[in-house]
Image (cartoon, helix red, strand yellow):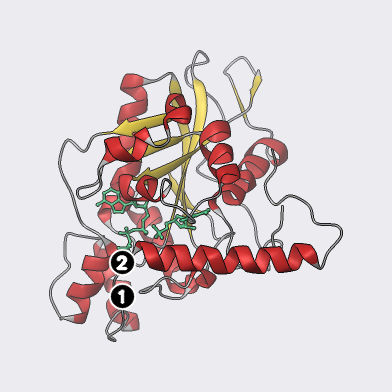
């Protein structure tokens, strides 16, 4: 894996990971949501609850853990606050508003890591280091890591230049994902383009539509409008105390921006692999 290595004093959080399967006939799954979380909203937290319900009713999965993995500052997406604040806000939300969610700062405090590499990190920590989970009879089981994302993210997977074919095969072929329907992005069109991995893509309809986004929250904050009940009160308090999101700045993200970003990274990657004869593939297969 081409990473800078773990951030200083890094310790993989696993205190809320359920280590014993309740139903040995089910496949243990850990959900990983990758994103900016600038700031984290109720919808980010709610995605996990929707996935739990979906898995219980429609699949032979038992969700044993859920993680928010805030992206690195190097992602440089417009509106991205420092990793420190984003991780703090996620930690406040997870600890006060959830009994089972955790926040992994591994990705946030280093250079940009592609989602395929992030999922490999979870696989390594949970299965290789911790030894997965056990059944009540003491039988060891590997945990399946799965990406949890909104349909806007899956739509970008069929846009040229944002995800490599190799990474898509790794994410959707090896791990799989839960996709939460999101207003404004055509889920059928998005998944049609990813048909060869259809068996590993689980689509969750939003029974109660909630289109809150971090972009809208940032906009409201800049305009001095109330964001109460869109995100946890404890996170709003943190934002107020630290005077966050008050400054003007570009608040939109678009396809060209993402494509440019990934072109830059590819160029950097090509340069570094050309200058190194020991170039290891960055994603385990
Ligand atoms: N309202 C929503 N419905 C479905 N999925 C959502 C919603 N809001 C966020 N997500 C998903 O949560 C994950 C993390 O997203 P991210 O932090 O980039 O949030 P965002 O609200 O889309 O941010 P921004 O507005 O800054 O682009 C992504 O997979 C995104 O698709
Ligand atoms: N090629 C990739 O691995 C790739 C491409 C686009 C977005 N992502 C990830 O998706 C998450 C959300 O990104 P956006 O906020 O740009 O939708 C981030 O964690 C980002 O790292 C990964």
Answer with left or right where residue 110 lies relative to residue 35.
right
* Crowd class of label 1 (few under 14; some 14 to 19; many from 20; radius 10 Å): some
Residue 167 vs 79, above or below: the answer is: above
Q: Kindly give the residue lying farthest to the left in the view shown.
A: 225
Residue beneath label 2, please?
235
Query: Cβ(mark 2) to ligand 1 < 8 Å?
Result: no
The picture places residue 164, in percent across and down from the top left corner, at 55, 49
Residue at 29%, 70% in the rendered image: 252
Residue beneath label 1, please?
239
* Total numbered labels: 2
Q: Is residue 4 visible?
A: no
Residue 228 vs 32, above or below: the answer is: below
Residue 81 vs 210, above or below: the answer is: below
Residue at 78%, 64% in the rendered image: 274
Q: Which mark is residue 25?
A: none
Front in this rendered view, residue 163 or 132: 163
Q: Callout 1: helix, strand or loop?
A: helix
Cα separation between marks 1 and 2:
6 Å
* Crowd class of label 2 (few under 14; some 14 to 19; many from 20; radius 10 Å): many
The picture places residue 51, in percent across and down from the top left corner, at 34, 35
Q: Callout 2: helix, strand or loop?
A: helix
Residue 229 vs 132, above or below: the answer is: below
Answer with left or right where residue 158 lies relative to residue 10.
left
Answer with left or right where residue 35 lies relative to residue 45.
right
Q: Are marks 1 and 2 in contact (CB under 8 Å)?
A: yes
């Amino acid at each position: 894996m081409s990473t800078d290595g773990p951030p200083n004093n890094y310790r993989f959080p696993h205190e809320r990971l359920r280590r014993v399967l309740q139903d040995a006939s089910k496949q243990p799954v850990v959900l990983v949501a990758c994103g900016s979380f600038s700031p984290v909203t109720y919808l980010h937290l709610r995605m996990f609850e929707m996935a739990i319900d979906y898995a219980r009713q429609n699949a032979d999965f038992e969700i044993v853990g859920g993680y928010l993995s805030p992206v690195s500052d190097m992602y440089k997406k417009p509106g991205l606050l420092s990793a420190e604040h984003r991780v703090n806000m996620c930690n406040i939300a997870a600890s006060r508003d959830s009994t089972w969610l955790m926040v992994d700062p591994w990705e946030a405090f280093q250079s940009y890591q592609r989602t395929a590499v992030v999922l490999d990190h979870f696989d390594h920590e949970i299965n290789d280091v911790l030894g997965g989970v056990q059944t009540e009879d003491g039988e060891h089981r590997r945990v399946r890591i799965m990406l949890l994302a909104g349909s806007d993210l899956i739509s970008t997977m069929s846009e040229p230049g944002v995800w490599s074919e190799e990474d898509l095969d790794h994410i959707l072929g090896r791990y799989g994902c839960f996709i939460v329907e999101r207003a404004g992005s055509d889920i059928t069109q998005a998944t049609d383009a990813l048909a060869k991995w259809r068996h590993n893509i689980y689509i969750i309809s939003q029974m109660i539509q909630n289109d809150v986004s971090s972009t809208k929250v940032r906009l409201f904050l800049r305009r001095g409008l109330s964001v109460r009940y869109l995100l946890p009160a404890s996170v709003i308090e943190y934002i107020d105390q630290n005077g966050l999101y008050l400054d003007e700045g570009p608040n939109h993200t678009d396809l060209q921006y993402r494509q440019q970003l990934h072109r830059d990274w590819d160029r950097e990657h090509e340069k570094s692999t050309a200058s190194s004869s020991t170039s290891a593939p960055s994603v385990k297969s």
